Image (cartoon, helix red, strand yellow):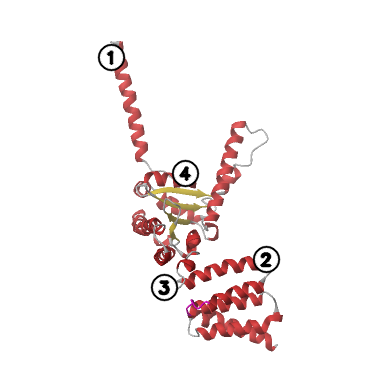
Amino acid sequence: MKRINLFFVLVAILSFLLLVVSCDKGTTTWIDDYETAIELAKDQKKDVLLFVTGEDWDSKSAELKTNIFGTRSFMDKAGKNFVLTQLDFSNALYETLELPENATDEERVKAAELETRLEKNANVAMELNATSMALPVVMLLTSDGYVYSVIDNVDNFSTAESYLDYINAQKKTGEKITELLKTVDSKEGVEKAKVIDELYETIPASHRYLVSDYAILVPELDPENETGAVGKYEILLAYTDAINLINGNDPEGAIKVFLNVIESGHLNEEETQEMYYQIAYFYNLQGEAYLDDILKYLQLAIEIAPDSKVAKEVIQPTYDSFIQLKNQ
């Protein structure tokens, strides 16, 4: 009899444990570690929904979490396609790092772990350009960490369902980026340049730096500019070189970089206009002694594409201001 009772007790315990495990697997939660999120996304073949917040000092962060992201309906449905990841920078978290002198060893260990996590999360937010955006920041990323959507119109979503519809529709862009990344390494020459250009244009402008290692290859891959896109990447390289030269106190060298790009013959009118304007800007960094050079390149920028929006709204007013300065 005792053996039978023991058997039923064990069965009951096992059934309970299986129920707990089953429920746990079916429940989606938010995690607070980006590296873990990427690992899970790869293992589970999902994307990452990244939510950067300051819940106790940013009202929109708190509202979005309460009204949409924190609802069970959203979490369970979004969790089917995304690893939900929140990097929160609430003041309360930082306040818990301030321990009293009589804090226990356990409290000190927990505080050290939290400090490490907050530091790592801050670095991730900076690397993903989230620190330059207004909170809350919502991004969708592939499992390889490529941002394919930045959702900054949070006020447009009043329900969990409307938000779900939007992010699920965005997944196609993520799938396209993943496929292009698989394809690019199998191509050579102009064909590779074409894939890189498509990849570059698919990624949001705010995060194209994530594929800069590919982008800088285009001029070499397509020396005859068969893609018609070489100028765009020559400009990208020129900015990198020019900034390094400016930081090295060599503005003349930076100007020469831009002139060389113009002389390559690969730029369209608006790209050439941009380069002339930047040359004028770099002359301006050197002071009023270069006023004639500033005016010269602003004039060239206007003449190359006088009807462009930039010419009318930015360059012409800038030119007029420098003319007034010269006539004083």
Q: Is residue 214 above or below residue 12?
A: below
Between tags 1 and 2, which lies in front? 2
Farthest residue toward the bottom? 327
In three-dimensional space, the C-alpha distance between marks 4 and 1, rounded to whole angstroms, equals: 45 Å
Q: Which residue carries the number 4 mark?
A: 36
Q: Earlier in the sequence, mark 1 or mark 3?
A: 1
Q: Is residue 112 left or right of residue 304?
A: right
* Percent coordinates x, y for residue 42 in the rendering: 40, 46
Q: Which residue carries the number 1 mark?
A: 4
Dot 4 and dot 2 residues touching (CB under 8 Å) = no
103 vs 199, nearest the viewer: 199
Between tags 4 and 3, which lies in front? 3
Kind of residue at disc 1? Ile
Farthest residue toward the top? 1
Q: Which residue carries the number 2 mark?
A: 248
Would you identify the image quadrant in which residue 249 lies? Answer: bottom right
70 vs 223, nearest the viewer: 223
Q: Is residue 103 above or below residue 270?
A: above
Between tags 1 and 3, which lies in front? 3
- The answer to whether residue 267 is magenta is yes
Kind of residue at disc 2? Gly
In three-dimensional space, the C-alpha distance between marks 1 and 2, rounded to whole angstroms, equals: 84 Å
Marker disc for residue 226: 3
The boundaries of the magenta stretch are 264-268
Q: Earlier in the sequence, mark 3 or mark 2?
A: 3
Kind of residue at disc 4? Thr
In three-dimensional space, the C-alpha distance between marks 3 and 2, rounded to whole angstroms, equals: 35 Å
